[in-house]
Amino acid sequence: MEISTLIKKSRNESGMTQEQAAESLGVSRQTISNWENGKSYPDIISVIKMSDLYSVSLDYLLKEETSLNGTYKEYLEESTNTVKSRERLAKIILIVGTLLIWTLCALAPLYIGNVRIAQIAYDIIPITFFFSSAIIGTRDYFGKFKWISVLVFALMYFFVGTVDEFDMNNQVYRQVIWWDPINLFIGASLSIAGIAIGTLIHKKKIA
């Protein structure tokens, strides 16, 4: 039996109209109609939602008495591959973006003569680390290995210089203090806080 037929049959048996189903699923009535007429296919997330909405098993919608329609199998595989590709791209952007910001801001104290501007660049790093960690937790990137990023961010923050000014012989000098051990603790704390908050958000989304 076609997935479109099963969807329509399940909706009718639940006593819901297409308008009611569309509102509950967060799609248009035309989308529901297209799914039921076989003009387009629902993604796997929508199928799961319909399973709950129509009070039928996921196995019934996807398998029932016959094997899953070959075309829909191909559609699901294509959709899954697209999602995976987007997730890989998002991870790459996150990693490259974080590294780029870290590199530019870490080098700022060496090449920017204005101490205040250099300090602002330096202050951007902890903000970046926190939000990058929060994204890792929210999207559950790297699964159980996401906590390894705590060590990575701690080491990255350790290799960042701290801008300092001092007076000598009535002259103002600027220096960069490197490899401050306290930065290990700061970097780790920022990452732990970000991942923890992100993980809580992730759990609420899937609850």
Image: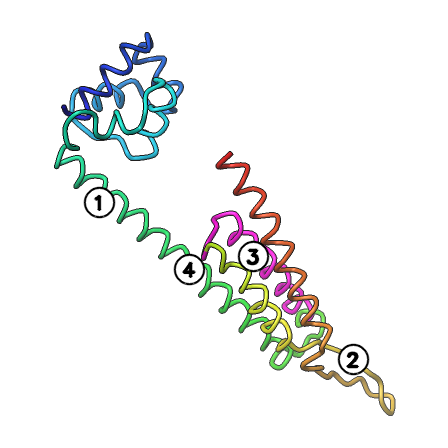
Give the residue number, with chain letter if any, for mark 1.
78
Please tell me which of labels 4 and 3 falls first in the chain: 4
What segment carries the magenta color?
119-142
Please tell me which of labels 4 and 1 falls first in the chain: 1
Identify which residue, 145 or 166, lies in the foreground.
145
Q: Which mark is residue 133?
A: 3
Spatial CA distance of label 4 from label 1 is 22 Å
Residue 68 is inside the magenta segment: no
Spatial CA distance of label 3 from label 1 is 30 Å
Give the residue number, with chain letter if any, for mark 2.
165
How many residues crowd around disc 3 within 10 Å: few (fewer than 14), some, or many (20 or more)? many
Label 2, secondary structure: give it.
strand
Give percent across and percent down for residue 107: 58, 77
Please tell me which of labels 1 and 2 falls first in the chain: 1
Give the residue number, with chain letter if any, for mark 4.
93
* Amino acid on which the number 1 mark rests in the picture: Glu
Identify which residue, 149 or 122, lies in the foreground.
149
Give percent across and percent down for residue 15: 32, 7
Relative to 85, is 201 on the left or the right?
right
Spatial CA distance of label 4 from label 2 is 36 Å
How many residues crowd around disc 4 within 10 Å: few (fewer than 14), some, or many (20 or more)? few
Relative to 7, is 23 on the left or the right?
right
